Image (spheres, rainbow, N blue to C red):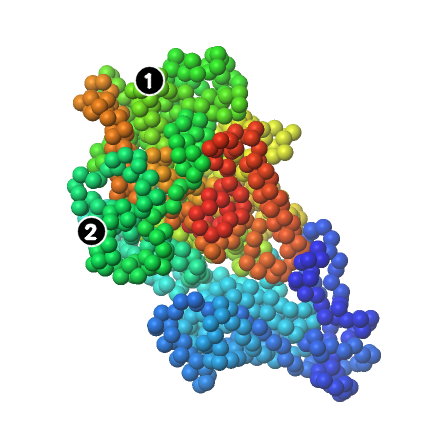
Amino acid sequence: MAMGKEFMGCSIIERSSFVSSTKVFLNHGKSFNNNNMFLVKPLQKRRVLVPLRKVVKQPVVAAVSEDLVKAVSIVSAPAEKAEKFKVRAVVTVKNKNKEEFKDKIAKHLDAFTEKIGRNIVLQLVSTEIDPKTKAPKTSNEAVLKDWSKKSNVKAERVHYTAEFIVNSNFGVPGAITVRNKHQMEFFLETITIEGFACGPVHFPCNSWVQSSKDHSGKRIFFSNKPYLPNETPGGLRSLREKELKEIRGDGTGVRKLSDRIYDFDVYNDLGNPDKGIDLARPKLGGEKIPYPRRCRTGRLPIDTDLHAESRVEKPLPMYVPRDEQFEESKQDTFSAGRLKAVLHNLIPSLKASISANNHEFKGFADIENLYSEGVLLKLGLQDELLKKLPLPKVVSNIHEYNRGIIKYDTPKILSKDRFAWLRDDEFARQAIAGINPVSIERLTVFPPRSKLDPEIFGPQESALKEEHILGSLNGMTVQQALEENKLFILDHHDAYLPFLDRINALDGRKAYATRTIFFLTYLGTLKPVAIELSLPHSGPSSRSKRIVTPAVDATTNWMWQLAKAHVCSNDAGVHQLVNHWLRTHASLEPFILAAHRRMSAMHPIFKLLDPHMRYTLEINALARQSLINADGVIESCFTPGRYAMEISAAAYKSSWRFDMESLPADLIRRGMAVPDPAQPHGLKLLIEDYPYATDGLQIWAAIENWVRTYVNRYYPNSSQICDDRELQAWYDESVNVGHSDLSQESWWPKLDNVDNLVSILTTLIWLASAQHAALNFGQYPYGGYVPNRPPLMRRLIPDENDPEYAIFLADPQKYFLSALPGVLQSTKFMAVVDTLSTHSPDEEYLGERTQPSIWTGDTEIVDAFYEFSAEIRRIEKEIDRKNLDTSLRNRCGAGVLPYELLAPSSGPGVTCRGVPNSVSI
């Protein structure tokens, strides 16, 4: 408790050894003079911190300067003769590291116009109402000092001061207004008010303040003291409502980049039919194709479809509210990534144009050369050729980035064993410890059955028979293996089958709908025992289903490798479109939009969620611009092509459920665990060495304990949750507007008791932090070597009656490589997942917060957060220990990669570890 109290600052009166009376008189000035004395309200010592409980309003104390406090004998004085005195604001502004020419001009202009009164004006607002005016008590307006003098300071942060005159009966400042009369916006990080008897008053702002020429009103910032809506002090009530109303906007107009308005819209900006009918894409969101909502930009419709929003193409920025945009270090990370992408797209394009026969990798050595020799060096391109390319910035940066920009980093999958990807045990291990450990399920019925309509998609029964797998079950019957929880399945059949006819009609795309059966060995590892490859049913005699089993000779070995590659391609699509994009990025956006629109910055639940919402709207906007759009990276690099987002939407409609997004519920739903109250997390894993689940459950429990402590602090009973109008409005809008297409489903949790609130908040924080990290930061380490996890396939597996079968028999390696993505597709994909797997230098990890000691004014919560941070560090040490335990064969062994995707901390770059607070890439 002491740590939080020390950071918060305590009452001046409490610290004074002079004070023993309940009435205190203060002298304004250096020398003591009875004529200057005035009466202030009695001050009470801060209560001793005890286990967390309901917040009790502390008594309002008078505003006095610490160096002016003197205790004297009791003397009467009329209250209306309250004296005026000065308090000081220390204002921290964060500078831009890089300034464009227009910024420099505006900066010099601002320094000049400061002298004629065009400056930055601040005003304090008390928590109290003035009984005479019935309005909040305010200080005088004060200007920031020395802006022009410090305009050329190169430091990252610059501190300014301002002085206010306040009455002794002012009370405690609860808000501060800021008006920017300069030409330029500036980033206001914090304001600290010094000189009040309560000690320093902190205002964590972390916001861009726009010029009054762009936004004429005053900005409102609240102190770090949290208030539930019905506990808002009188002086702050109108400001609380005013701020929320401004953030919501009125739902009309085209958004400017400087706006900070949060609103909802459908995904109607992914296509661009104005450029050609082949770039038309269906609207996602609505009765026809249900989908979560995204941030509204208000852009005008395109010419050919009034229901489709016009596009903004890179490098022009997409609108997100100003404070959601990346900070500079994050932008720099993306800039470097874009640089790589340009080079890595361009060079293979040149290579393809130089030699029409060079679209495919000739051998595995060609792929490995991307890491060892580099693309440019491999081509032998000289500086003269580089100078001719229309990329001056790229060329000038080549030497700055050294040769690393021309070479791909060696993916982690190759770092311990170059041939690990070929092994069956590694193929199976990645289903529980790779980049998509959330699709595998326990098999409960054999043979498995489809849930698709048999009238449209043919028989629901699988073609798998007992004889296909019996020899791989260590002497068990299939029924015994089912009863003893030994059989597991990776089932992508229903996700792909409805789209296969259209996918396989695309140029350079060939896919099956796959099912893979695994057997759990006595060592606790999985082994694949059969793969079912399905094509659309086209008639009673159609051979639409095919079973491939582990190899028995050279030919079946290559067949088996091709079948595994098709499984990995299926899995890569489901991972990216459903588990990664839909379940973390897209499904969280409505909750973030509604939080800003409906909960004040002073609401305790907003303060809890704040770090878990950072950058998500921006990265989702960038995805709509470049990744999930028509002809974007996802369509170019993954098997479903132009139907990618329709597969994502189909999953949202058929299988996404918010109540199943918590880790324990998801594990039980997939049959990977069974409820067991005797176990630490209330469930028992059926694969004990399931690295994603074992690490994840520890992090889940830590988050849940932290959230429960936090919620209990502000809501000692459920009625207060029901009566919190902002909290209820947030959840209602998240569900009924943000997820309106599914809002009538009965599975939505009710926000009517403490347990449900804890569960909802824990789920959101889990999805934004650990779940996203587990699904994102291994993309390059595992997918950067394309044969391990091909994002698309270009050939089906030939059978003996196919004309291609002879080609396959003659050179199976060549056939295998020709089925994988080509050079251009591979290098483009590698460049993108390299960027997406990168931590930026300003990453904030789970257990960390910006301004950790002042993000809230509640000292007991600050102390509880430090305990949460300590628990996260303890879990990290436990993960490190498990990765050295040779009995855990799915994360430790010869050539086996340790499972670090849920290890909370990381340095910058591609590290295959680290759990950021939010979905920020």
Residue with the mark numbered 1: 553
Determine the residue positioned at 69% across, 51% down: 52
Locate residue 145, reporting x and y percent: 53, 79
Residue with the mark numbered 2: 275
Taking 499 as reference, is 234 above or below it? below
Viewed as shown, does residue 896 lie left or right of 337?
right
Viewed as shown, does residue 743 lie left or right of 72?
left
Question: Mark 2 falls on what kind of element?
Answer: helix
Locate residue 790, reporting x and y percent: 33, 35
Taking 24 as reference, is 500 above or below it? above
Determine the residue positioned at 21% across, 56% down: 385
Residue 5 visible in this rendered orientation of the protein? yes
Quarter placement of the N terminus: bottom right
Viewed as shown, does residue 811 lie left or right of 293?
left
Determine the residue positioned at 58% across, 55% down: 604
Specify few, some or many for label 1: CA neighbours under 10 Å numbering under 14, 14-19, or 20 or more.
Answer: few
Determine the residue positioned at 31% across, 20% down: 554
Locate residue 682, reporting x and y percent: 61, 32
Viewed as shown, does residue 253 lie left or right of 278?
right
Locate residue 115, reporting x and y percent: 46, 85
User: Which residue is nearer to you in this view: 689 or 686?
Assistant: 689
Mark sitting on residue 881: none
Amino acid carrying label 1: it is: Asp
Question: Mark 1 falls on what kind of element?
Answer: loop
Q: Quadrant of residue 66?
A: bottom right
Residue 293 visible in this rendered orientation of the protein? no
Specify few, some or many for label 2: CA neighbours under 10 Å numbering under 14, 14-19, or 20 or more.
Answer: few
Report the number of numbered marks.
2
User: Which residue is nearer to you in this view: 141 or 375?
Assistant: 375
